[in-house]
Amino acid sequence: MWQTNAVALRARTASQRSGHRPLLAHYEAMLVDSPYFPDELEALPGLLAGAGFEPDALVATHADYDHLLGRLAFPGLALGLGEPSVVRLHQEPGAAQRELRDRDAELYVERPAPLALGQVQGLPVPGSIELGSEELELHPADGHTSDGMAVMARWCGVLCAGDYLSNVEIPMVEAGLGDYRATLARLAPLVEAAETVVPGHGAPHTRDVALRILDEDVDYLDALERGEERPKLPAGRDTREQRRIHAENLERLR
Ligand SMILES: [Zn+2]
């Protein structure tokens, strides 16, 4: 459902960067965003451990409820959020939990425990955080929502874009059209420097595919700004559901 992506990243611990070659490599790992369904969340720790990823930290690209579920898989870890997301959580207390409850009710999803965000850790955006001996860049990505960040793991060529650059979803402009445009402009050089771009929903993309989607999204925003009722939507995204999202975008701009 929604083709939701969670991304695990890892890097060698700082002490292992130089000096002698260790017998066993030690890594720090981080989970970006989260899967949705209880069985996915339950399977995640074992699945990741089997691939050599044992998360020490959780982050979410933005404060929409479908991205905040990491602690349901790793209840012992704190959730890191960009400062704008922390502000949003304070402005809308309980909203994420309420929306998750409503969506679960609609989908008949039963969870062993409700969502508890615990101690949320605010991260600087723009800024960077350490993962082992490497650095994760945090770039502002607002416009879809009032908060949002893109996470760039430059050393391994991975860009976690949050809810941008999706091949299955047109831009959902819930905050500002100008902010959305500025985010796409900010993402462009990051995409150029990435090998793999992972949107919040849809398939991970190669650089070239992500650049094509970015162009399509700019064209879509132009049509939205002109107030077109029936714009040409990009191939693969011209569906009834995307037309409904377009109608919502138009409504919000009026
Ligand atoms: Zn999302």
Image: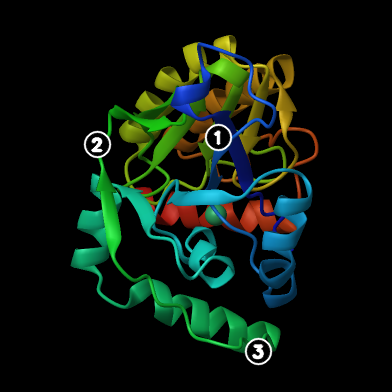
Query: With 167 as the anchor, is 113 left or right in this view?
Result: left
* Residue that mark 2 sits on: 124
Q: Is mark 1 within 8 Å of ligand 1?
A: no
Which residue occupies the foreground of this view, 164 or 216? Answer: 164
Q: Residue at x 37, y 40 (%)?
A: 143
**Mark 2 in CB contact with mark 1 (< 8 angstroms):** no
Q: Earlier in the sequence, mark 2 or mark 1?
A: 2
Query: With 153 as the anchor, is 204 left or right in this view?
Result: right
Q: Residue at x 73, y 28 (%)?
A: 205
Q: Earlier in the sequence, mark 3 or mark 1?
A: 3
Instruction: Examine the rendered structure and indicate whether residue 184 appears above or below residue 57.
Output: above
Which residue occupies the foreground of this view, 58 or 102? Answer: 58
* Residue that mark 1 sits on: 160
Q: Residue at x 58, y 13 (%)?
A: 20
Q: Residues within 10 Å of mark 1 (few under 14, many from 20)?
A: many
* Relative image position of residue 66 (x, y in whole percent): 54, 63
* Residue that mark 3 sits on: 110
Indicate which quadrant contains ligand 1: bottom right
Instruction: Examine the rendered structure and indicate whether residue 104 appears above or below residue 57.
Output: below
Q: Inspect the image, locate mark 3, and give the three-letter code of the amino acid beneath it.
A: Glu
Between the C-alphas of marks 3 and 1, the distance is: 29 Å
